[in-house]
Image: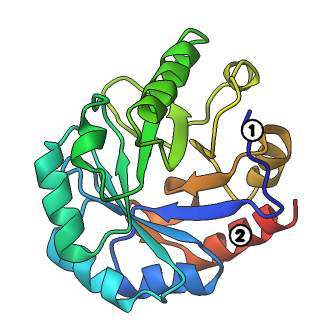
Amino acid sequence: MSDVVSSSVLVKICGLTRIDEAVGCVQLGADWIGLNFHPPSPRSILPELAAEIIAALPVRATPVGVFVDRPPAEVAAIADRIGLRVVQLHGREPIEDLSALRDWPVVRAFRIRSVEDWSSVAHFVERAEAIGHPLAGVLVDAYVPGLPGGTGLAIDRTLLDAAPPLPRMILAGGLTPENVAERVTWVRPWMVDVASGVESSPGRKDLEAVAALVRAVRSV
């Protein structure tokens, strides 16, 4: 479970593809807006559109770029050019990438498929702190072979029960307006990350569902 307990769990809505929907999510209470730069994903967008979305966001929103196994120099160039405030690494990126991305807070995602995976997570967190670039967030997601995320599948509860204390845990995987309050109460994450759980179709956000999800999170 997370070792950081906030009075208000933060909300990240990920995989935005439209300016109006991104702005709407923030107006409804989302704290972070995730922009996907992984071309195989149906939620992937070009940096040019991402820049337009970022320019339209209210100042209080944090734009996050989601990358999967891209060279760190490429990630840094995109982040700098379009104004990303956080970089999320959602593949198998090595610890060395953090040094190349030292100018940005970095969230590292981990897909959990067994209890043994938690030792790898804890080791990565410790090494990041040791090299002077502690992670801005530790995102945990369900493991699905061949897919880095956005599957709509939840992490098995028995696996989450075995989680070590993690700084700024971000819970992802299968969260919806209907189940998020129960999961937040049980896991006590720092933030929840939702993509498919508030969509009408891949990449298109249902703002009524976003509003319901934010209300559910804030109700805990």
- Asked which colour scheme the image uses, the reply is rainbow
What residue is shown at x 68% (from left), y 51% (from top)?
190
Q: Are marks 1 and 2 in contact (CB under 8 Å)?
A: no
Quarter of the image where the C terminus is located:
bottom right
Quarter of the image where the N terminus is located:
top right
Q: Position of residue 33 (x, y in %)?
A: 46, 69
Image-based side of 219 in relation to 75, left or right: right
Under mark 2, the amino acid is Val
Image-based side of 12 in relation to 41, left or right: right
What residue is shown at x 68% (from left), y 76% (from top)?
211
At mark 2, the secondary structure is helix
Image-based side of 72 in relation to 93, left or right: left
Q: Position of residue 100 (x, y in %)?
A: 21, 45
Q: Position of residue 155 (x, y in %)?
A: 62, 30
Measured in 3D between alpha carbons, the distance from the residue under mark 1 to the one under mark 2, in whole angstroms, is 22 Å
The answer to whether one can see residue 219 in this image is yes
Front-lying residue, 110 or 215: 110
Q: Callout 2 environment at 10 Å: few (<14), some (14 to 19), or many (20+)? A: many
At mark 1, the secondary structure is loop
Quickly name the residue at label 1.
3
What residue is shown at x 61% (from left), y 36% (from top)?
154
How many discs appear?
2
Q: Quadrant of residue 10?
A: bottom right
Q: Quadrant of residue 119?
A: top right
Under mark 1, the amino acid is Asp
Quickly name the residue at label 2.
214
Q: Which mark is residue 38?
A: none
